[in-house]
Amino acid sequence: MEERRNRDGGSFLNVALPKGRLGEKVYQLFAAAGFECPAILENSRKLIFENPETGVRYFWVKPSDVAIYVARGAADIGVAGKDILLEYRPDVYELMDLGIGKCRMAVAAPEGYQDDPARTLRVATKFARIARDYYAGMGRDIDIIHLNGSIEIAPILGLSDVIVDIVETGTTLRENRLEVRETIVPISARLIANKSGFKFKRAAVEKLTAGLGGVEK
Ligand code: PRP
């Protein structure tokens, strides 16, 4: 199949956007930086949108999948949370901190929980590598309980002692009577690029990063 071309006969800049609220904010930033694609604002179930005028092709993917598309070259660039980059360590360039999607990775426990450092700590999390690295750094023995969501329930039901999870406003913790014990690392959304795509589409990527640098967040 012949590759579709943009207005100037070049290839499109393929951008993987994280589906959801963060992705919509990211699109607004990219549009302000000169990569508009008004069709994306139509309320449809379509997942791929392109604008030959600005030479951009966007696709919506699950936030935790963005780095997979970019690492394998199905997307030239994308936006992924630092949490995903730390957890999965995809082979991509991290070009820029977009300063949005800010939250933190933290250890939380039920209110009043007393830790016994002599015991193996049971840690429920979606982020096994981040948790393992964090506790390895302090020489603490842990037992990882890998869950896929609703992590806050684990210590309430006695499945774990603590959790390692993302805290944004803190509401989920509060409403489940948990509290932050330690902050592991601050998180925000990062612009990432495929390593070879970056060489071939350097001009477009640089236009984007320069534009993003000047956009009010
Ligand atoms: C994340 C995280 C917390 C919540 C924190 O959940 O796992 O549950 O957001 O936000 P808050 O501090 O503002 O309350 P997410 O929506 O990604 O769902 P899941 O982890 O249950 O899949």
Image (cartoon, rainbow, N blue to C red):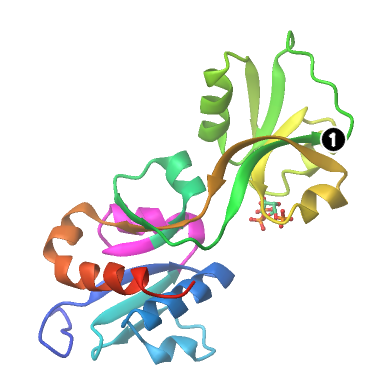
Query: In this orientation, does residue 19 appear?
Result: yes
Left-right relation of 176 to 193: right
Total labels: the figure holds: 1
Q: Quadrant of ligand 1?
A: bottom right
Mark 1: amino acid: Pro
Q: Is residue 203 on the magenta stretch? A: no
Question: Which image quadrant is residue 197 in?
Answer: bottom left
Q: Position of residue 64 (x, y in %)?
A: 49, 55
Q: What crowding class fits label 1: few (fewer than 14 Cα within 10 Å), some (14-19), or many (20 or more)?
A: many
Q: Position of residue 82 (x, y in %)?
A: 47, 49
Quick check: 115 above or below 87?
above
Q: Secondary structure at mark 1?
A: strand
Q: Which residue does the numbered mark 1 point to in the structure image?
A: 110
Q: Position of residue 208 (x, y in %)?
A: 28, 72
The residue at 53%/49% (across/down) is 187
Left-right relation of 144 to 2: right
- What segment is highlighted magenta in the picture? 61-78
The residue at 54%/89% (across/down) is 43
> Farthest residue in the top direction?
118
The residue at 43%/46% (across/down) is 85
Quadrant of the image for the N terminus? bottom left
In depth, the one of 134 and 89 nearer the eye is 134
Q: Position of residue 209 (x, y in %)?
A: 29, 67
Q: Is residue 65 on the magenta stretch? A: yes
